[in-house]
Each structure stands twice: as structure tokens, then as C-alpha cells.
Amino acid sequence: MSDYLEDVLLTLVGTDTSVPAGSIEILPGDATLERAVTTTVLPLIENLQPAEIRRHPDGDIAARFGPEGDDGLLLQTYIVSQHGNLMNDPHQARIVDGAPMGLDGPTVLGQGANQNKGPMAAALTAVRHLGSLSRPVWLTVNCEGRSSHGGSRRLIEELEVSAAQSILAFGTNLQVSLGNRGRVDVQITVHGTSSHSSQPELGRNPIPPAAAVVAALDTLPLPPAHPQLGPATATAYQFRCDPIAPHTLPSTVHVVVDRRLLPGEQPAAATAAVREHIRPVWPELTVSEGASMLPALVEPDAAVVTALAGASTMYSRNAFDAGYGCSRGIPTVMFGPGRRDFGGGLLAAEAVSLADCRQAARTLRTAALTLCG
């Protein structure tokens, strides 16, 4: 079991599945991603001899172990690596001493090791020897790379994967994440008219009203903070002028607001509330709903939580994919090896402890057998 996990993890980390340099997302059907899935990940799954494999044109994979049915477990893995983007030799997978990085024992270093590939190796190892099952265990590979629920929608709606419980294999420090806030990118465009900066009176400079729009977010009405998930927030994180030209006022300013959502909130309604709040600032505004993720919340005594025997629980600060499963009535938690630190260290050196990966594989296997054995 240990040798298999180590070999698989090194193979996965040595395969480029990163967001391209200079971009913040990777589109479905990307050629590099498709090649990685087809030549590396699919053969690993085929070697596990599932009862069936379903594939989506965008690359997503759904493999069923055990009988047919809609009362089993969905164990979801992710292939796109979004962290470790400042690493040297990011795809030169190697085993190092983890002590300098605060990890115990032999550690695999390389892009994706911490975020998604350590958890994926653990999940592949967990389903390797499940034996006889009374309910299905679905092992899926999600190719989403745009911080949305696109991959989960493809798996559940288009590949028709149905389950009663779900675990997302993702780095959580071997804790069970019971919930997280959702998010929606509120896209705001402030319109003006270009002119030479020596004669600003001949144009309509959209920069001051765009700054006023950002300032107005401080008074945006928001729901009360959630006791476990924290506050709803509205944070401007992109401010882009167009066109960029010498001594030229822009004709538009694009602002992107990260609106964090609490349980019960919907992206469309949150976007509409931002639109109504900032409308008085400037008569020429365009506000639209961008990429979004729904909030997630699972009760501590849910079957999928208790099946992850012995793992402590926590709540995640970041938005992630668990909200989609929860919105479909499937209690969905996150669990896996890997740190929750998103600071500079994780950008420069992504690594995961082999011991943690092996512990995660044992815990995931126990959960699968408890729910479906």
C-alpha cells in the first residue's frame, strides 16, 4: 500500500496540471490538462478495475466501484493545481526531508503535492482494495480550473453520478471540513469617455466614480456573521482601466468584488444587492454576476462525518466545491492531507508528508467501507 501510494504521488506531482503562467484560470478542455488526464490519471484508474468508467468531453472522470445505486459515496478528487506557482522546478517530483518545512518524515515536494495531488494519491490508494461492497463508491476526477462548480455540475448532472454522501479529497490537515462560505465575483464596469489627460474636461474620467464605488462597499448591508463560518464580506480585489495609453483617460474601469456568501444566500441575489447599493454613485454602471461557489454546511453528526472515524472537525475560510453537493442534498465534506496555510511559503514550496497521505488513505478507506461495505 505504501509503495503504491508513493509511486502514484510522484507520478501525479511530476505531471503538469497547473494554471498557465499569466492566467488565473484554466478552461475546460485545455490541451495540457486533457493530456495529463488521458495519459496519466486515466490509466491509474483503469488499473484499479472499477465496474465502469464514465468520461466527460471536458476531461472529467467518474469510476464506479461496487453495485449500481444512488445511495453510495462520492469520493471526489481534483486535478488542476493552482498553488505552488512560485516554485523552482515545480514538476520535478522528489522526496525530501520534511523537517525544514515543518513536516514529519519523508515528504514529496512539487507543485500540487499539498493542494490536490497528495489527497488524490490517498483517494486512489483508499479504493484500491475495497473488496465486496453493498453500495457504490464513485471515485471522480474533477477538471474544474475556474474556481466554480463547473466540474461538479458536469459529474453530477451530465455524467449522472448520484450518491447519498460525498467527500472531497483536498488538503485539510487531516481534519474534516464541515463547511465554508460561498463566493460570487461581482463584475462592475464604470463607463466614461476617453480624452487626453491634458484636457480632462473633454472626457468623462471614470476613475473617481470607480473609487467611490469601491468606497461605497463599506456601507453595503450584509447579513449577520455566521457562528462557525464568520462574516459575509464584500472585497474589491481587481481594479483595471481600459484602454491603457500614454496620457489618456480610460473610457472604462472594471472592478471585481469578491462577495463572500453565508448559508441561505444566493449569488444572483447578492449581485443584485450590490447593484442597487452602488447605483446612486454613478449613472453609467454595468453590474453582472461572475464565477461563483455556493456555501456549504454539514452537521457534525452526519453519517459522512462519523464515517471519517477519529478525524477532528473544522470550518474552512476559503470557498470551495462542497457547496454544490450540499445544494443538491448530498452532505459534502472535505478531507485530506495537506496544510491549510495559503501564505507565501505555500506559494514557494508546496509539499506533503507521505505519512499524512498514508493516514488519509486509511481514513478514506474506512469511511468508504463504513458507508458502503
Image: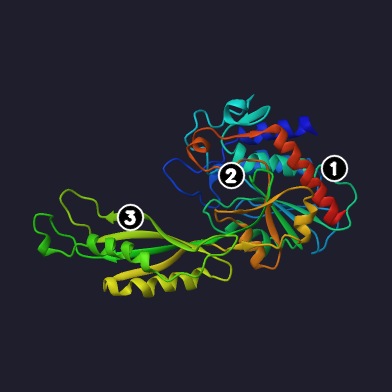
- The disc at residue 59 is none
Is 38 placed above or below 207 here? above
- The disc at residue 129 is 1
From where the camera sits, is residue 51 visible? no
- The disc at residue 340 is 2
Q: Residues within 10 Å of mark 2 (few under 14, many from 20)?
A: some
Q: Residue furthest front?
A: 227
- Amino acid type of the residue that numbered disc 3 sits on in the rendered structure: Phe
Q: Residues within 10 Å of mark 1 (few under 14, many from 20)?
A: few
Sequence-first disc among 1 and 2: 1
Sequence-first disc among 1 and 3: 1
Mark 1–mark 2 Cα distance, whole angstroms, equals: 29 Å
**Looking at the figure, which quarter contains the N terminus?**
top right
- Residue appearing at x 75%, y 39% in the figure: 359
Mark 1–mark 3 Cα distance, whole angstroms, equals: 51 Å
Q: Nearer the viewer, mark 3 or mark 2?
A: 2
> Mark 3 highlights which residue?
239
- Amino acid type of the residue that numbered disc 2 sits on in the rendered structure: Arg
Figure label count: 3
Q: Nearer the viewer, mark 1 or mark 2?
A: 2
Disc 1 element: loop
CB of mark 3 within 8 Å of CB of mark 2? no
